Image (tube, rainbow, N blue to C red):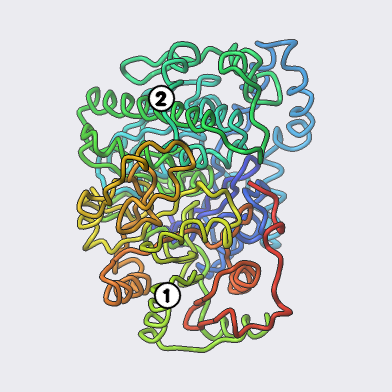
Amino acid sequence: MPASVKILGISAYYHDSAAALLIDGEIVAAAQEERFTRKKHDAGFPHQAVAFCLERAGIALADVDRIVFYDKPLLKFERLLETYLAFAPRGFASFKTAMPIWLREKLFLKDLLLSELKRYGKEKIDPARLLFSEHHLSHAASAFYPSPFDEAVVLTMDGVGEWTTTSLAIGRGNRLEMIKEIHFPHSLGLLYSAFTYYTGFKVNSGEYKVMGLAPYGQPKYAQTILDHLIDLKPDGSFHLDMSYFDYCTGLTMTSAKFHDLFGAPPRKSEQALTQREMDLAASVQAVTEEAMLRLVRSAVAETGIENVCLAGGVALNCVGNGKVLRDGAAKNLWIQPAAGDAGGALGAALIGHYLHLHQPRQAVKPDAMRGAYLGPEFEQADIEHRLRAAGAVFSVLDDAALCDACARGLADEKALGWFQGRMEFGPRALGGRSILGDPRSPRMQSTLNLKVKYRESFRPFAPSVLREQVAEWFELDGDSPYMLLVADVVEARRKTMSEAERQLFGIDKLNVPRSDIPAVTHVDYSARVQTVHVGTNPRYHALISRFNELTGCPVVVNTSFNVRGEPIVCTPEDAFRCFMGTEIELLAVGNCLMRKEEQDPALKLNYETAFELD
């Protein structure tokens, strides 16, 4: 065994391609390809993400001991073929669409991957260095191995991997063993995606909109879902009635029988939202939460292990995660911040390290993810060079002056682009590539949605709060560094609503200030909390601390630095373009501060229609 063990993990060819690099088990780098190509959910081979990982470590691909792909294409092909045969001839349209791609590319994935990897050096890749994990095993590994637990049960819930849609594993030390699975077509993730499609949002990207819409509605269809669509058992296992779904045989998610059950065809994208969509969202959210609770309770009861790790796309349902935490069956809960397919690249690398090479493991506290700040960063001199080349006008300030100027801008209700340190891995901006605002402003939520993000007005924003003061503002007294837990605003910070305000329905609830921090308080008093830790992001912690000194509020609005349909910004140039294409008023990139009024008006861009809607 070489003195230093280097493992590269890759996920690709479905959505959210990514690469991750381990050296001696330490996560050195991880990034999604979309950030480099500027193509949302880019599914292509992650050429630039791989190049970044190698460059970050200062190594060549020839130095890597193992390259691990996150799933097994032959098993996935088997599932597709068996599904088409089982539903024949109804699946022919879907079969005809999928097969040419499989026969041309995916079925011979090992050859394709070896061909793609050739571009990183003249040396031919030894096929023995290329390994394949299984999809759910990759997810489970991404959750257990970076967690702070020596022993844990690992619950993975998503749409579908090869065959598996829900799995339970046990992790102990450097070992990870799958003990239970639920197989396609029965899928909690695909049930949620069916309602995403039916309510008019895009599958594989709009599920979080359904979650955000749910508090505006009532779960009046929840029993209908439980009576007709899903047979949910007390232990959380489930079975779907496939006559209501079309994803096995057709090119849509739901069938005519589904539409008849709920009394209308699917909402068309961008049509006005009605109370009905809000009630549907509330209903599928309630059913999903109940399934998550039952699965976790039964896993803990069956194994006697009270440490629980979550991964898979369903683990990004932070409302459900919050309910699991408060339920108490899991004494300790840890969720992989890149819980979707991008995180599969990290899980694949971890499998290569621990399960293939049998390296020892020592659990790290608070976890091994480094705050998820695993992407590219830029030196100050490079930032200044890049911004000058882009035509930016900026001042260079020391750390204290930068935090003071930005905190004062926030207190004046300005929108601030905040580009600092390493880019986050996963779908959440965590104070590395963020747009920030004043949570005390009743106008901030609407301003950021409509004038900065160019997205639907109902979408909630998350609070970033100093870890030391989280319990003074939210019903949470623990760590939530990855914005994956929802907690309510504490009673002392809530505002009393009038009788008329309490009677409002749907979107009419939006403009009623509910707390001292209305911009981050959802209509049900909830908030998707990020705790900010001085150890993982000292500059972000310093900014919020200065804002707290000025305002008495240790909370800021935090949303990802992009517009609707655009990947989160990666480079200083991306940040400056987004700044000039929106109504963001201040931009801090490293120690450079830009004010909108000082920029060349000729550089202003129309960002509202620059990207395909998500």
Which residue is drawn at the image coordinates 62% and 34% (left, top)?
200
- Residue 606 % position (x, y): 71, 65
Which residue is drawn at the image coordinates 24% and 56% (left, top)?
473
Amino acid type of disc 1? Asp
- Is 418 located above or below residue 176 in the figure? below
- Is 38 located above or below residue 588 in the figure? above
Alpha-carbon neighbours of circle 1 within 10 Å: few (<14), some, or many (≥20)? few
- Quadrant of res 373: bottom left
Q: Which one is nearer the viewer's eye here, 25 or 18?
A: 18
- Residue 55 % position (x, y): 56, 68
Which residue is drawn at the image coordinates 40% and 66% (left, top)?
438
Q: Which one is nearer the viewer's eye here, 537 or 403?
A: 403
Give the residue number, with chain letter if any, for mark 2: 287
Which label's residue is closer to the chain start, 2 or 1?
2
- Is 297 located above or below residue 555 in the figure? above
Give the residue number, with chain letter if any, for mark 1: 412
Q: Which mark is residue 140?
A: none
